[in-house]
């Protein structure tokens, strides 16, 4: 197999694993995690093999034609940006699979969970590797669908169902914005692949459609990455099992929006709109998320809101436009993936081994869970931006990007200091409060977690430490190529554990001091924020419920008006729309500026048409329904004669048969009813119906006259005449069209007739059964029913 085939197989492996997961779990139990974890390990190894070439400025592309007529392909682009995400998704994904094996040990649906998790992994890998616009959108929506399955995994709980529904609505709705934005970019640039779009930034920015494309793309990115005011779905997603939360927040879906913004930075970035919208919304998300995190006492919710803050910081840095801002975003994204994945898994360990995640009901676990405490403390040190962990390097680079003097830099630096200090307090609240102090009685007897549970967070915490000491290698293989891909030009990251002397170090020290103060006054701060939220009352989460209720009520009203259960209403609306479509556009677009040319009609054809008109008048003037049914067949027979005159005897025969059977069947059916009364509707009903019928007939006539004015296009006729014998081996062109060229359509028609026949048969048998039951109980009732 060549490299392209291996890459395609690597992208498909998670979906193949999802098919095998239930069978493996049934055979091996929770130990199936060791086998399934080999899938992301293999993906990691395959793509890591590209790192040397990508570090030298290269890219890996490939793919297969999907819809060639629209230049749509299943193609991938692996550069510094996508490679970093792929390695995070697959590397952390392997640890999450192992963690899930221990966390859900004994769960009756563990195999199904593994299947959902691997599908989610495959969706994220496809998203970040996509070169094609359509491929990215397909995988973008797949992440929403698979996250819906994971968040609602415990579907028996209403809270889990609501959280899954909310995440799907918000992120799926944002996906529609993204689709529109990609279509606008396609319209502007004329390309359908990111590899071709990257060099067309000046063209996109100069287009009058730039702002529309930007807003639509931001709609998709902000909903996916939980930016204010679309942040509310992310904390609610904590209803998912902890392995999902750890994966969701460290390396996967919530960073998809950030990935999209970073991918499109060379195309959409650098403008005033970009450098205003992203920093403002990012900073607002950073501050709001940090404040709401302090308010929580549930370990997972505390971490969830800090993820929201971190995403805001990443969005702010991506759009900030200052030197070192892109580099800071790169370092912080990697550091956040490592420490947040570890801390979420630590929260899951605490919950799994003690039976609670409430920080106010925990304490003194250090002696019972020393290894978990060490892992939590290491991850918290990195999250707090303290040496010697990779989070320290990220924080130093963030403050280097904000250290310029000026109102804009000073304002955002102040907001970042507050947000980072609050996250510092939350990090150490998670890492210290459950473990220090006097032991507290917990619902379950606390003890150290088994290997499958602590292996993942332990390796992530060590990775944060190793990345700091090996920063030169990490920057050469990861940070610099990723920053270069985001910036659209070569960037080199050289930061090490040696701090920036000057303003960045001072801002960092101020953050640590403020964070210690917030930690010491955490209880008072929590009470103050809770009081403020109670005073505000309304929030986006409640607004979502109100919006959904309003949508349901609106749909009920609309449905009640439009779907009122009356067939005459449906037919009237349908034919009114037909008349509008046929008559209005020709007048609007000047198609009927001159009178239509009426073709000359031979006398015998005119006589046939006159017979059809006479039949129509007979239908309208019929005194009883049976006469109207028989008269209705006159129009069909007239059309059949026209077919016969124009050399289509087979069509004429078919039309004769259909009209004859229709009249006979209708007459037989109507004999079950009273045939004597005629239609005695009042004039106020008859006149509108007549007007609609005349409008439809006039529109169809004008359309046919306009079509016949142009020259006849014989392309289809020539095609069928040429290929009927050579391809379909048939001399009767009409039969060949129906049976061969339109074989699927004909099969569909036959299926429709068959289904209708089965439905009629079911109704007949149902009525016969009802009559027998009536007769068994009351013979006189049977006679009455007949």
Image: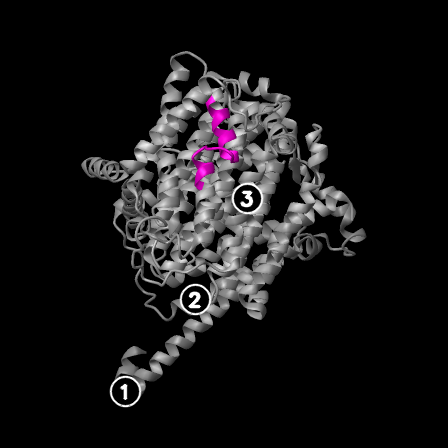
Q: Secondary structure at mark 2?
A: helix
Spatial distance from mark 1 to mark 2, Cα to Cα? 33 Å
Residue sitting at 41 percent across and 25 percent down?
Answer: 509
Judged by depth in the image, the label closer to the viewer, 2 or 3, is: 3
Residue sitting at 35 percent across and 42 percent down?
Answer: 429
Q: Quadrant of the C terminus?
A: bottom left
Q: Secondary structure at mark 1?
A: helix
- Please, what is the dominant secondary structure of the magenta stretch? helix
Q: Secondary structure at mark 3?
A: helix
Residue 379 picture location, percent across and down: 47, 42
Disc sitting over residue 8 in the figure: none
The colouring scheme, among rainbow, by chain, secondary structure or one colour, is: one colour
Q: Judge whether residue 722 can be spotted in this image.
A: yes
* Front-most of residues 724 and 14: 14
Spatial distance from mark 2 to mark 3, Cα to Cα? 85 Å
Is residue 398 located in the magenta-colored stretch of the structure? yes
Judged by depth in the image, the label closer to the viewer, 1 or 2, is: 1
Is residue 610 located in the magenta-colored stretch of the structure? no
Decide which of tag 2 and tag 3 comes sooner along the chain.
Answer: 3
Decide which of tag 1 and tag 2 comes sooner along the chain.
Answer: 2
* Residue numbers of the magenta segment: 380-399
* Front-most of residues 575 and 73: 73
- Residue annotated with mark 2: 667
- Residue annotated with mark 3: 462
* Furthest-right residue in this view: 726
Disc sitting over residue 777 in the figure: 1
* Quarter assignment of residue 226: top left
């Amino acid at each position: 197999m060549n490299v392209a085939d291996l890459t395609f197989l690597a992208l498909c492996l998670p979906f193949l694993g999802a098919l095998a997961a239930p069978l493996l779990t049934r055979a091996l139990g929770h130990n199936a995690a060791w086998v399934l974890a080999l899938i992301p390990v293999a993906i990691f190894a395959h793509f890591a093999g590209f790192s040397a070439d990508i570090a030298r400025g290269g890219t890996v592309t490939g793919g297969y034609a999907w819809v060639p007529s629209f230049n749509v392909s299943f193609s991938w682009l692996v550069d510094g940006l996508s490679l970093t995400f792929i390695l995070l998704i697959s590397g952390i994904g392997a640890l999450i699979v192992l963690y899930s094996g221990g966390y859900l040990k004994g769960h009756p649906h563990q195999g199904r969970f593994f299947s959902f998790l691997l599908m989610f992994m495959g969706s994220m890998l496809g998203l970040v590797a996509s070169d094609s616009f359509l491929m990215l959108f397909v995988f973008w929506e797949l992440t929403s669908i698979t996250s819906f399955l994971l968040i609602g995994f415990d579907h028996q709980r209403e809270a889990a169902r609501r959280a899954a529904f909310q995440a799907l609505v918000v992120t799926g709705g944002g996906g529609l914005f993204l689709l529109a934005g990609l279509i606008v970019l396609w319209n502007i640039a004329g390309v359908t692949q990111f590899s071709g779009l990257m060099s067309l930034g000046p063209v996109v920015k100069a287009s009058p459609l730039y702002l529309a494309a930007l807003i639509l793309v931001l709609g998709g990115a902000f909903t996916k990455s939980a930016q204010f005011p679309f942040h509310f779905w992310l904390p609610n997603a904590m209803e998912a099992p902890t392995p999902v939360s750890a994966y969701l927040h460290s390396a996967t879906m919530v960073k998809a929006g950030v990935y999209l913004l970073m991918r499109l930075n060379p195309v959409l970035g650098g403008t005033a709109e970009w450098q205003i919208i992203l920093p403002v919304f990012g900073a607002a998300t950073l501050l709001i998320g940090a404040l709401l995190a302090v308010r929580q006492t549930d370990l997972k919710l505390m971490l969830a809101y800090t993820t929201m803050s971190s995403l805001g910081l990443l969005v702010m840095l991506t759009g900030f436009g200052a030197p070192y801002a892109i580099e800071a975003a790169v370092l912080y994204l990697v550091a956040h993936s490592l420490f947040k994945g570890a801390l979420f898994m630590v929260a899951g360990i605490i919950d799994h081994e003690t039976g609670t995640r409430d920080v106010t009901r925990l304490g003194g676990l250090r002696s019972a869970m020393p290894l978990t405490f060490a892992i939590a403390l290491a991850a918290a040190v990195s999250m707090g931006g303290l040496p010697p962990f990779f989070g320290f390097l990220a924080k130093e680079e963030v403050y280097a990007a904000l250290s310029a003097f000026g109102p804009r830099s000073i304002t955002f630096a102040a907001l970042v200091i507050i947000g980072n200090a609050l996250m510092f307090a939350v990090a150490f609240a998670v890492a210290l409060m459950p473990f220090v102090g006097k032991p507290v009685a917990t619902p379950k007897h606390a003890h150290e977690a088994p290997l499958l549970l602590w292996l993942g967070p332990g390796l992530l915490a060590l990775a944060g430490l190793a990345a700091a000491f090996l920063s030169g290698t990490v920057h050469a293989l990861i940070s610099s190529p990723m920053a270069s891909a985001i910036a659209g030009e070569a960037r080199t990251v050289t930061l090490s554990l040696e701090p920036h002397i000057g303003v960045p170090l001072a801002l960092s020290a101020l953050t640590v001091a403020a964070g210690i103060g917030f930690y010491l006054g955490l209880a008072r701060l929590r009470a103050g924020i809770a009081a403020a939220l109670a005073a505000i009352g309304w929030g986006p989460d409640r607004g979502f419920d109100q919006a959904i209720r309003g949508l349901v009520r609106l749909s009920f009203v609309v449905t009640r008006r439009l779907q009122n259960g009356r067939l005459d209403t449906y037919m009237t609306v349908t034919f009114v729309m037909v008349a509008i479509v046929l008559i209005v556009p020709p007048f609007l677009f000047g198609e009927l500026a001159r009178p239509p040319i009426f073709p000359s009609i031979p006398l015998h054809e005119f006589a046939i048409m006159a017979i059809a008109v006479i039949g129509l008048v007979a239908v309208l003037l019929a005194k009883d329904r049976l006469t109207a049914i028989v008269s209705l067949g006159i129009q069909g027979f007239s059309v059949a004669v026209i077919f016969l005159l124009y050399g289509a005897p087979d069509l004429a025969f078919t039309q004769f048969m259909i009209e004859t059977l229709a009249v006979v069947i209708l007459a037989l059916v109507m004999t079950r009813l009273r045939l004597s009364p005629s239609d005695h509707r009042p004039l106020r009903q008859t006149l509108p119906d007549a007007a609609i019928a005349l409008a439809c007939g006039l529109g169809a006539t004008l359309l046919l006259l306009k079509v016949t004015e142009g020259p006849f296009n014989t392309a289809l006729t020539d095609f069928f005449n040429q290929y009927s014998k050579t391809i379909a081996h048939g001399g009767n062109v009409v039969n060949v069209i129906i049976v061969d060229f339109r074989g699927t359509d004909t099969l569909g028609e036959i299926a429709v007739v068959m289904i209708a026949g089965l439905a009629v048969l079911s109704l007949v048998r149902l009525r016969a059964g009802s009559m027998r039951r009536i007769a068994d109980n009351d013979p006189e009732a049977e006679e009455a029913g007949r």
